[in-house]
Amino acid sequence: MALKILKGLCVVGLIFNVVLMYRKMKQMRADTSTDNVWGMTGEEQWQEQKKHWKFNLVVGVIANFFDTLGIGSFAGSSAAFKMGKSVDDINIPGTLNVGDTVPVLVEAFLFFGFVELDTLTLVSMIIASVLGSYLMAGVVSKFDRKHVRYAMFIGLFILGTVMLMKVLGVGPFGIMGTALKLRGAKLIIAIVVNFVLGALMSVGVGLYAPCMALCALLGLNVGAAFPVMMGSCAYLMAFGNGPKFIQQGRYDMVASWMQAGGGAVGVILAYTLVSSLPLKVLTIVVVCVVYFTSLMFLHDAIKKGSAI
């Protein structure tokens, strides 16, 4: 029953955001004012944005393919938009949040039921991350991003190493877990840490890789991380970030549709790959993602400092 409700929320969120996107697109295209940063009417903006639809469609497919593997799509999409000059810089944040909402909802829908994860474990971890994001956004947004990124680099690098030693059977860490539920102290740890991870999303710390490491180190089947992390982000985007950016209208109308449609295709392709991988191979993929993400945090800490 709980699984049906979670999937149903994904469908509701998808329809809700697509309707909002369509209504806002009609409103923006009907705007005849040129008193904006682009000096163009809404229809002129639409025609200009259409010139890049093929490129942005490919970006949507590729970025969300890797997002489904846990690497994330925002960094890759941002770089592609910038290098391809296919989305105005001022529109990139909104385009990412609006366009990627649909693919993330598709991810969550597909991965709910990916493994027979205990309902209490799944739901409590998702609720914790959503609450963390909403309740702690104002507090966490004031954190020094540079130090947060260094801490995430060190933490993820260590966690990735422990996971690798587990899967290879090296050292005192034992083998990878296969549990499908958490209880007692482990469940409390999972809830508290996922609450913190949800809060850290406000400073640009992605939830995917840390959540993967958390699930693995608590002894869960590594596949359990997929429904947890994707459900957490899907609800945040569908009922929070997505509608907010649509309301503001500061995004690329065409690119957002390409991200939504192409991204959904990329998700389905990646799901087909992930669902066919043996547990040990999937775990090694997760280890690679954790290492890669840790290095991204180090890069951002050095290059961006405390900037967003």
Image (spheres, rainbow, N blue to C red):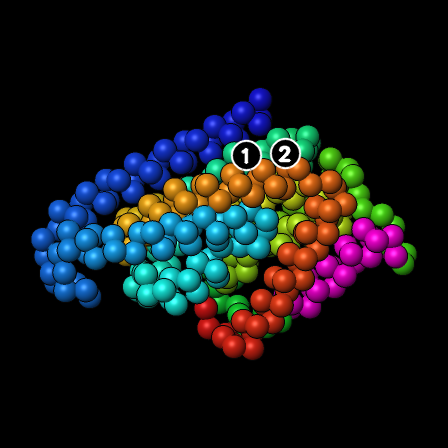
| Residue 182 disc label | none
Q: Residue placed at 28% from the left, 50% from the top?
A: 254
Q: Residue placed at 73% from the left, 52% from the top?
A: 284
In the shown orientation, is residue 40 left or right of residue 68?
Answer: left
Amino acid type at image mark 1? Leu
Which of these two is toward me, 239 or 35? 35
Q: Residue placed at 53% from the left, 31% from the top?
A: 6
Q: Percent position (x, y) of residue 246?
A: 30, 48
* Residue 127 visible here: no
Amino acid type at image mark 2? Phe
In the shown orientation, is residue 231 left or right of residue 219?
Answer: left
In the shown orientation, is residue 98 left or right of residue 235?
Answer: left
Q: Which secondary structure lies at badge 2?
A: loop
Q: Badges 2 and 1: C-beta atoms under 8 Å apart?
A: yes
Q: Residue placed at 53% from the left, 54% from the top?
A: 72
Q: Main secondary structure of the magenta part?
A: helix
The relative height of residue 238 versus residue 38 in the rendered view (above or below) is above
Q: Percent position (x, y) of residue 302?
A: 56, 77
| Residue 110 disc label | 1
Which of these two is toward me, 228 or 114? 114
Mark 1 Cα-neighbour bin, 10 Å: few <14, some 14–19, many ≥20: some
The residue furthest top is: 1
The relative height of residue 7 versus residue 1 in the rendered view (above or below) is below
Q: Is residue 88 magenta?
A: no
| Residue 114 disc label | 2
State which region is magenta.
151-170
Q: Which secondary structure lies at badge 1?
A: helix
The residue furthest right is: 172
Q: Percent position (x, y) of residue 30?
A: 13, 47
Q: Is residue 163 magenta?
A: yes
